[in-house]
Image (cartoon, grey):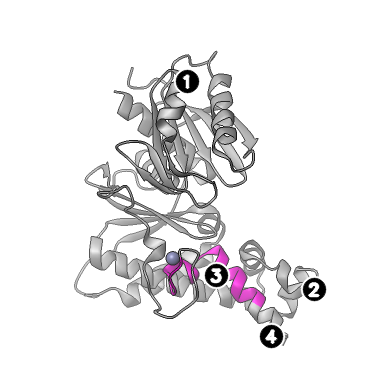
Amino acid sequence: MATRPAIGIDIGGTKIAAGLVSGTGEVLHRLVTATPGHSEPEVEAAVVDLVRAFSRDAPGAPVGVGAAGWINPDTGTVLFSPHLAWRHEPLRDRLEERLGRGVTVTNDADAAGWAEWRFGAGRGEDQLVCLTLGTGIGGALVLDGALRRGRHGMAGEFGHQMLVPGGHRCECGNRGCWEQYASGNALGRDGRELARAHSPVAQTLLAAAGGQPEAIDGELVTRMALAGDPASRDLVAEAGEWLGIGLANLAASLDPGTFVIGGGLGSASPQLLETAEDSYRRHLTGRGYRPYARVVRARLGADAGLVGAADLARSEAR
Ligand SMILES: [Zn+2]
């Protein structure tokens, strides 16, 4: 029974990815649908349809849902979600009622971190910090083989450590959060700023954006850095420097054995990881007198969220 498949659902701002996941973390069958508007009933209906589509292959399989936001792990209530209109939404109860079976609801970065620990780059590491680098920074903490979600389900919001008081404004309302300096959004903002300053060093980047500074985003900067554009490489190096400073802070508090770095940006830029590891080693407190944590790239790619959500559902169903 321990290896029976479970259904994992990853609710994103633009799409909902679903997979039937084996006990060894393999995605046996997958479905994707566009996130239908942002209203609760529409999104719930889409999740129910996806689960039912797997019913013939895996009747009664446990269902795990991952979503961005603050989720109370005891009640499965979404307290707040950045992409969706959910505020104090009893998502787990609603879905259980409609599906007639147990549902587990988890923060998406926690689900991804759990998947990397179970089946990916964090396997065999009992003190693990996992970061999902995309437009922002998501985090997960797996200590002594258990996902640590904090007293209110909000642990792992590492992206909102304040690194630069009075710095760039963050979506969370504060200024100077880590994710304003080491994320896709940070790369895009700095790339646009450089292009708008009519800096000659930004010429290649600007040309790649069709001459429109506002078309520059983190993805473009990352791609241009990979292609060797010096200005884009400088921007990635700067983000990597900040990324490493945040890792050093996390190591000072948590002393993990490994940092696993994934997400769209984390997976796309080897340069970012190399610069971050170098910066981490230069900023770690007690350096020279203590071991360094490994900094490794995540292995499960975009599947991590749904694989982790499914596996958590399976382990809770036992
Ligand atoms: Zn913030």
Task: Tell me which numbered mark, 2 or 1, is placed earlier along the sequence.
Answer: 1
| The residue carrying mark 2 has its beta carbon less than 8 Å from ligand 1 | no
Task: Tell me which numbered mark, 2 or 3, is placed earlier along the sequence.
Answer: 3
In terms of secondary structure, where does tag 1 sit? Answer: helix
Q: Is residue 181 magenta?
A: yes
Q: Which residue is mark 2?
A: 211
Quarter of the image where one finds residue 228:
bottom right
Question: x%, y% of residue 212?
Answer: 77, 72
Question: x%, y% of residue 109?
Answer: 42, 48
Q: Which residue is mark 4?
A: 197
Above/below status of 291 relative to 21: below
Are circles 1 and 3 on residues that touch, CB within 8 Å? no
Q: Which residue is mark 3?
A: 186
Query: Total label count?
Result: 4
Task: Tell me which numbered mark, 3 or 4, is placed earlier along the sequence.
Answer: 3
* Residue stretch rendered in magenta on the structure: 173-192
Q: Which residue is mark 1?
A: 99
Question: x%, y% of residue 309?
Answer: 42, 36
Using the numbered discs, state the Cα–Cα distance from disc 2 to disc 1 in whole angstroms.
50 Å
Q: Amino acid at mark 3?
A: Ala
